[in-house]
Amino acid sequence: MQMMRVHRGVLAIFVVAVLIGQACSSLPKNKQEAYIRINQLGYTPKGIKVVVLGMKSSQKIGEFELVDARSNKTVFNGDAGEAFGAYGPFQESYRLRFSQFTDTGTFYIRVGKSRSQAFRIASDVYKGAADFALRYLRQQRTLFNPYLKDSCHTHDGFTLYAAQAGLPDSTKIDVGGGWHDASDYLQYSTTSANATYHLLAAYRDFPEVFGDDKQANGLDGGNGRADVLDEAKWGLDWLLKMHPEPHLLFNQIADDRDHAGMRMPSEDSLYGRGYERPVYFIDGKPQQRGKFVNNTTGTSSTAAKFTSAFNLGSALFETIDKEYADHLRSKAISAYAFAKLMPGATQTVSVKSPYIYAEDNWMDDMELAAATNWLVTGQKQFADEALHFARQEKITPWLETDTAAHYQWYPFINIGHYELAKQLRGNEREEIISYYKEGIEKVWDRASKNAFYRGVPFIWCSNNLTVSFAMQCLWYRNLSSDEAYSELEQANFDWLFGCNPWGTGMVYGLPADGDTPTDPHSAFTHLGNFPIDGGLVDGPVYGSIFNSLIGIQLVKPDEYAPFQSNLAVYHDDYGDYSTNEPTMDGTASLVYLLASKEGESRGETPVKK
């Protein structure tokens, strides 16, 4: 039984019915179960509305009903359409479409004697969702943590690998701040810079979505600035510390020695120097502090992400704090120069285990950096540089290969294409837009063959890829006005909120009364019984991946056992760090996606045609 939660500031979905596992009247006499999967957040009147029916038998169906939950009267009859066949735990499956129904209210889908959970159709179903996801970002803050009203990691840190830059190993440096990366307390520049960029872009593109209920330090009380911009500035301030001088740019704080056990953040002291933690310099070369060596090839990928975040920050703070904006712009210039020192990708460092962020690409990061340089300076040379980098990586590789190592192609889609195409005109603009379309087509070729329209691979952090791919579809649609992939886009969004084989949402506490994670791999919940509101968990992985990972052991009976398969598994279980651990950068990307959904429901669009 899922815990019932009520969260302030988010429109709770009025769930008046729960999934009933009764047999569909048209199913065989052995009464196999049928399951109807919905987006628990609901649907907008003018939006795409689809649910998925999965059955444990191969029996076919012909129609379905949309029923008013209050009167129990049928308000729409629909044709079930084509059968998609087996997928995961189901032997037969259908996409049940009812987009032409535009009335508002609370409804459920009925197929024979089986019915879905109730859901709302209303223009405000996404209201407050983006701000809700910000709760997790605030909870991940280090230095001062507003959720705990306590400080942590105030002694970071001591340098490693920076001797060539004039800092011998163990030199003391002040890099306190930023966000913990996930349920561990490592801090990575690559994920933090990407998260910062997404928060800034969310505010830039959909400013009316966000409220002002928090101070800059994250405590209650407005400060005249949108909370998302406060959170983005928290990230920017830490990135400034990680790039204190033109010749100094740091990659991460701490390493996998952090994984020794669960503890609250203020108790973190595992490196033999009290509460100090190591701070790894980016030297563009492979690094290791144990038996594992990463495959770093250069300085470009992470330093370019700094550039993009600083540039966008400078543009947004120009009219708010001119001195701060100018400082960010100067740092963008030096970070871009650092990115060019040794062209190549920077990977993270691991000591005891083989798990790292194994980023291999960097042209996409350089494209975004150049495109934002063009945005803030207007200098044509940066447009030329951005076009050059764009043509080196037209399609993010996983879109085509359907696989990747952990964070191998980061940040999962090419954000630079979007920022560049918005500024281009004519044939060059169309060229860049075509790269997005080509990548989407690669995924659509896989997705079109199953009822969930699932074309994203079940690799580690599959939910992060799902968010990013939905954004690529969104950006392509906004840039091109082509609606061909709108249902694919919506299917990826729906997946995150319950329209998946397990019927569960992937965001803690959203919606308030939905089936969402309650036992994530998190010290906050496990040790303190604190909710991690808004956190996006990693998501399902291939069964082969789950069975090969180190140190996973479920700690309770699997409530989703009937829906596990060789294709993919997901567990709402503290013991499964591979599918149920929330991540800071995935949640920051989700903030943008949720903001776009609410913004579009308000009629907002970030792209001028």
Image: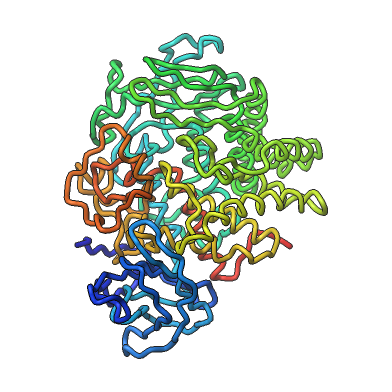
Task: Locate residue 225, reporting x and y percent.
Answer: 51, 53
Q: Which of the 4 image quarters holds residue 12?
A: bottom left
Q: How many labels does the image show?
A: 0
Closer-to-camera residue (384/250) = 384
Residue at horizontal 32%, vertical 90%?
71
Picture layout, residue 530 above or below residue 42: above
Q: How is the image coloured?
A: rainbow
Closer-to-camera residue (602/549) = 549
Task: Locate residue 89, reporting x and y percent.
Answer: 33, 58
Residue at horizontal 33%, vertical 21%?
352
Picture layout, residue 82 above or below residue 441: below
Is residue 249 among what the camera can see? Answer: yes
User: Seen in the image, is 474 located left or right of residue 91?
Assistant: right
Task: Locate residue 25, reporting x and y percent.
Answer: 29, 81
Q: Which of the 4 image quarters holds residue 329?
A: top right
Question: Quadrant location of the N terminus?
Answer: bottom left
Picture layout, residue 589 above or below residue 206: above
Task: Locate residue 190, reporting x and y percent.
Answer: 51, 34
Is residue 323 among what the camera can see? Answer: no
